Amino acid sequence: MARIAPLSGFPEWLPAQRAVELHVLDTLRETFELHGFASLETRSVEPLSQLLRKGEIDKEVYVVRRLHAEDDGSTDPDTLGLHFDLTVPFARYVLQHGGHLSFPFKRYQIQRSWRGERPQDGRFREFVQADVDVVGVDTLPRHYEVDLPLVMVEALRALDVGEVRMRVNDRRVVEALVRGLGLTDVPAVLAAVDKLAKIGPEAVGRLLVERAGASQQQAAAVLEVAGVTGTDLSVVATAAARLGAGSPELDAALPDLQHLLDAAGQVAPGVVVADLAVVRGLDYYTGSVYETELVGHEDLGSVCSGGRYDDLVSEGSTRHPGVGLSIGVSRLVSRLLRDGSVAATRPTPTAVLVAVTAEEARSRSDAVARTLRARGIPTDTAPTAAKFGRQIKHADRNGIPFVFFPGDGEDDLLGQAKDIRSGEQVDADARTWSPPEADRRVRVVRTEA
Amino acid sequence: MARIAPLSGFPEWLPAQRAVELHVLDTLRETFELHGFASLETRSVEPLSQLLRKGEIDKEVYVVRRLHAEDDGSTDPDTLGLHFDLTVPFARYVLQHGGHLSFPFKRYQIQRSWRGERPQDGRFREFVQADVDVVGVDTLPRHYEVDLPLVMVEALRALDVGEVRMRVNDRRVVEALVRGLGLTDVPAVLAAVDKLAKIGPEAVGRLLVERAGASQQQAAAVLEVAGVTGTDLSVVATAAARLGAGSPELDAALPDLQHLLDAAGQVAPGVVVADLAVVRGLDYYTGSVYETELVGHEDLGSVCSGGRYDDLVSEGSTRHPGVGLSIGVSRLVSRLLRDGSVAATRPTPTAVLVAVTAEEARSRSDAVARTLRARGIPTDTAPTAAKFGRQIKHADRNGIPFVFFPGDGEDDLLGQAKDIRSGEQVDADARTWSPPEADRRVRVVRTEA
């Protein structure tokens, strides 16, 4: 065991930290299932040819090979790579298993992904994501573009991680405006606008002129429109009219985005706002797009993103349009832990430690433990029949709130239970005694850090 | 999307199958946590130098490299591989994070592993394992050799997968007998005995003579002892005395194994039996060893194995002895699914589908759905405002037992609920109506296949 150094970008949690992550995963799952998403997992590997289809992220893919496989080069189409997100494998899953699925098909998927990029704060080489997607066949009703972001808002609020802000947009709105302004190279405009938060309006203006063929006036108009935020889109229509950028396409798309804002305003006031600069770099989105920040942790980047896509999944004449969002669980959890804003009440599930009077009497303690467990109380027995003081110390070190001392009478299950925090000790029958509800299971609580 | 063929050895489940796997994982977790094991996960990769320490499985390791990393050959000590079990990464975790752990430390770990071996029925290249281990510092009380296998027996019984049989042995017993019979090459004897089930006693006898330096008489004695099974070990002492193989070491080790059998007999009669031919090929076990079969599915091999190890984890003068067992979740689930002996009650979590009368009235249906979800009832809304017959068909196709029809009165939450299996339809208030408890959540039930 010579090399035990941590690997940069491959996070691991201590037990109390893992309890926080587990709480996050449980809460997400509960929310997703309440909304009717079925659980799925996919294999961790895909053929390299699938993973490299988009081109732009090829540097990040991890190739996987058996140690003793004959190495005939990475051009082998059967070479496997670790998936870098859950969308590509889900798309492949839908095509492969579509005959066994009922559409529109809603699934959630909570799984690890891998990217070989340079590790940074909140950016890992191995990380957990939690995705929800709905996919249809040929068509998919627009209401899912309202439903799915609201599921994620509900999930993030259930996590109680502090204030979140989801910034939404519709690529159709932006595209209509760009064309309305007389610009034709839409991808170049979107690529420039996508950099707004990073490089600022001046630099984006230059990009629009240099790469998207915009005049100074057109660039200024794009920047004005991209600056629109809020929950009332009438300003967009007004600005478009003033700039001469109105169009039937814009009139068709704006109400859908407004509907999302209105519906979100009812369910979670103030959480979802339009931001016309949100365009998402990936080119497969064709309608709504979403990004979500933890308020006060904007430096972390988006913790929940996604959008509508029409052409990600298609084969021959069958098209599977979809809407999906992905929560960066590792990113979120790493910040919660670094920040110290949440904590698990203890690092072990154990609520009760049953003391052992003597090693020969261990079966008495085992009987008590069995009885408590059968009643749903996580229970452990003391490692050794040490002095009670040391057994209590073992409980204390592990954050176990109660120690049960078996008695020495005829009935194995009668003894005393001690709350080691208060020191209070009471007669207890393992068949009926319980720790308070709040102590039975590990809880994750907000701390005033 | 050209290549969508399944990859042999990389199993994926359909939604209803995944529901079975999820039930297995939930049940294991619940049992492990009731016994005070803390959840942990480790990163998926380890330095190749760690993974190859044991030598015997080097052919099976998957090497992981960034696609564009400079390839300076696999001898680079920093080259990473996917872990092939959860024991090696846990050992490394204990050394790396030991300063933050409290010993004896009990953890469970449910995670994927990868082995590049030839896929067979129940043997995969990517698979999920569920491990429990307890590790101490320098010493570890023997009672954990009784506790941990019983946790796994309890977990397997909670899964309700049919009869299981755990075969147990103690390497100290076998070693004492081997030495008592005058044989000195203990590893060679164990390696031969390990093959008993596969190649039969005659061939093992030859191996003992040819490779372990045994006389014909010694080989026969080994085979006699290896043939002992049952729950009463007095036959071992008797046989040892008759064969002249008694020793203080044997006298010391036999009672521990008998104690395990007795304790198991109390908790789960008939499940745990001694089998002196069980020695487990891996050389790091130093005490109890365990293997578990599904009765009627012995061809599947062991679904839960492990043992006591004293030297797996050590660094300098610090030793971490442990006891651990591992359930092959993918192996188990794949057989349950193939066998058809268990099934999920439906492929989706949704218990209630709220019908949509008209697309303009979708917000009424959303309000009903929100109210039901707030009461813990998994609910979806109909994809479109199609004719009710088609909406009911959508529910039926997804195994959703109830359809809620919103009314058209002033109160959005009043309507009717229809059990689409019986056709029964009743007035229902979304604030108070519930599907029967058995329909609220997906259940996994035994089928009479």
Image (cartoon, coloured by chain):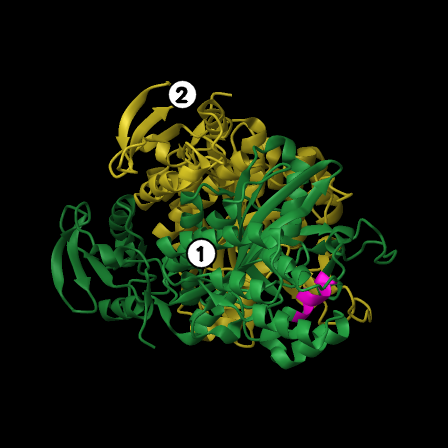
Chain colours: A green, B yellow
| Location of residue A151 with respect to B428 vertically, above or below | below
Q: Amino acid at mark 2?
A: Arg
Query: Could you tell whether B440 is left or right of B46 in the image?
Result: left
Mark carried by residue A261: 1
Quarter of the image where one finds residue A172:
bottom right
Name the quarter where the N terminus of chain A is drawn. bottom right
- Residue interval drawn in magenta: A185-192
In front of the other: B120 or A10: A10
Expressed as whole percent of the image width and height from the top left, the position of residue A78 reads 80, 49
Q: Disc 2 on helix, strand or loop?
A: loop
* Residue A187: in magenta span: yes
Please say if the residues under marks 1 and 2 sit with CB atoms less than 8 Å apart. Answer: no
Q: Amino acid at mark 1?
A: Leu
Report whether residue B315 is seen: yes
Quarter of the image where one finds residue B428:
top left
Residue, far right: A72
In front of the other: A445 or B380: B380
Instruction: Tell me what residue is drawn at x 72 percent, y 68 percent.
Output: B79
Expressed as whole percent of the image width and height from the top left, the position of residue B19 reads 49, 38
